[in-house]
Amino acid sequence: MGEVTGPRKSEEASGGSVEPQEQVPAVAPAPLMVPQQQVPVQPQVQISPERIQKLQELLAQLIIDSTDLGLALGALDCPYAEKCPLVRASREIAKSLLEIRKLTKR
């Protein structure tokens, strides 16, 4: 049988004929370069205080009417409600109302 050529375990442990390995300093990985996306600038539109007031009133009325519709459809006892496009639309309105509520509570 052939002999294994290389340092013996006793030589490795004592540092006999084994040459020390060169230590390489740790280098931090370079940060990932992610290209920044340019956000288009929206032109600012000046809205008169009267129009803002009217918009606030319309939004308030829309919220009230949508809530009433959602409650009425939620209490609806119909075997076809799950497939009804009116019920689906009402659920989408309810999701929007919940999002508005979250934004206004902050």
Image: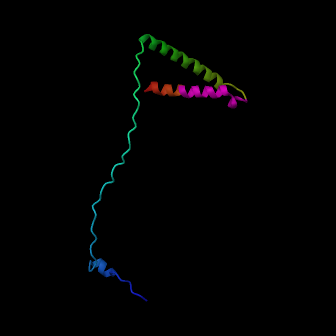
**Image height of 52 relative to 31, above or below:** above
**Image height of 73 relative to 28, above or below:** above
Q: Is residue 84 magenta?
A: yes
Quadrant housing residue 71 = top right
Which quarter of the image is occupied by the N terminus? Answer: bottom left
Q: Residue at x 36, y 83 (%)?
A: 5
Which quarter of the image is occupied by the C terminus? Answer: top left
Q: Position of residue 82 (x, y in %)?
A: 68, 31
Q: Residue at x 42, y 12 (%)?
A: 49
39 and 67: which is toward the camera: 39
Q: Is residue 61 magenta?
A: no
Q: Position of residue 36 (x, y in %)?
A: 38, 39
**Image height of 29 relative to 15, above or below:** above
Residue reaching furthest right? Answer: 79
Q: Position of residue 9 (x, y in %)?
A: 33, 80
Prevailing secondary structure of the magenta residues: helix
**Image height of 11 relative to 27, above or below:** below
What range is drawn magenta here?
79-96
Quadrant housing residue 83 = top right
Q: Position of residue 72 (x, y in %)?
A: 64, 22
